[in-house]
Image (spheres, rainbow, N blue to C red):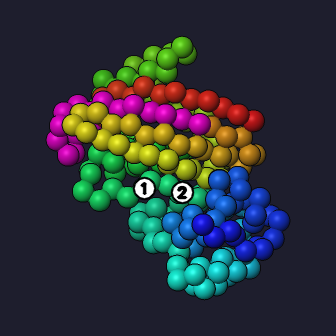
Amino acid sequence: MTTLPQIGKPASRALNEINISTLEQVSKLDELNLSKLHGVGPKAINILKDALKDKGMSFSNIDEDLRKLKFTVIGDLKCDNAPKRKIMRDLLIATTVGDESTINELLTDDFIWHVPGEFDLYGKDNFIQEIKKHLQKVSSLEVKTMLSHGKEASTHGTIINTTGEKVYFADMYTFENHKKDARINTITSYIVMKP
C-alpha cells in the first residue's frame, strides 16, 4: 500500500474522515467526485493525480448518473449485472437528497419501514414524509457493501453531513418478487448517529 503524498491539512483531514489513507484507495475514486469533498481543492487533486500516475494508477470512472450529485459518493457502487443493486443504490441516494419521484418509483404502495426498537412506518407516502422531515446537507455517502439474492438484499455504509456528524446505517431489503425490476416492499434499518 502506498501512503498519500503531502496534499495539505484540509485535504488530508477530508480524506481521513472518509477513511482514505492510501493511493490504492484514491484510485477507486473518480476525480470529479473527490473534488466535491470539502477540503479537497484543485491543488490536492493535481498532486494526487501526479502521484497516481507515478505509480501506474489513475482515478476511477464513476457512473454518469452519479456525476450530478452535489456530494461525494464512494464505495461499492457498481451495479454490473445486478439490477437490484442499482435499485438499492438509487433508493439510497434518493432518500439522501429527498428525491420523492425516485422514491415513489422504487417502493410498493404498501411499503413498510421497520427500525427495530424505534418504530414501524406503513406506506410509502409516510416514508417520504419522514425522510423529508429529516433531510440533512450531506458531505459524503460511503456504501461499504451491497448484496442481493432473489427477493432479498442488503447494504451498509456511512453518511457524513456537512457539520461532520456521521450516520452509520445497515438496511435489509425485501423486494415484491424475484423480477429484475421489482420494487422494494420492506426495509429494516439499523441506524447509529455519532456527532
Q: CA distance from mark 2 to mark 1?
A: 8 Å
Q: Position of residue 3 (x, y in %)?
A: 68, 68
Look at 33% across and 37% down and name the residue there: 153
Q: Is residue 187 magenta?
A: no
Q: Nearer the viewer, residue 40 or 58?
A: 58
Q: Nearer the viewer, residue 41 or 149?
A: 149
Q: Which residue is mark 2?
A: 73
Instruction: From the viewer's perspective, tell me whether residue 132 is left or right of residue 160.
Output: left
Q: Position of residue 141 (x, y in %)?
A: 56, 50
Numbered marks: total = 2
Residue that extends furthest to the right in the rendered view of this protein: 9
Instruction: From the viewer's perspective, tell me whether residue 110 is left or right of residue 119.
Output: left
Instruction: From the viewer's perspective, tell me whether residue 4 is left or right of residue 120.
Output: right
Q: Are marks 2 and 1 in contact (CB under 8 Å)?
A: yes
Q: Residues within 10 Å of mark 1 (few under 14, many from 20)?
A: many
The vertical placement of 114 against 143, above or below, is above
Q: Which residue is mark 1?
A: 77
Instruction: From the viewer's perspective, tell me whether residue 120 is left or right of residue 51.
Output: left
The vertical placement of 195 against 47, above or below, is above
Q: Which residues are magenta?
A: 168-183
Residue that extends furthest to the front in the rendered view of this protein: 1
Secondary structure beneath dot 2 equals strand
Q: Nearer the viewer, residue 145 or 69?
A: 145
Look at 25% across and 39% down and name the residue there: 149
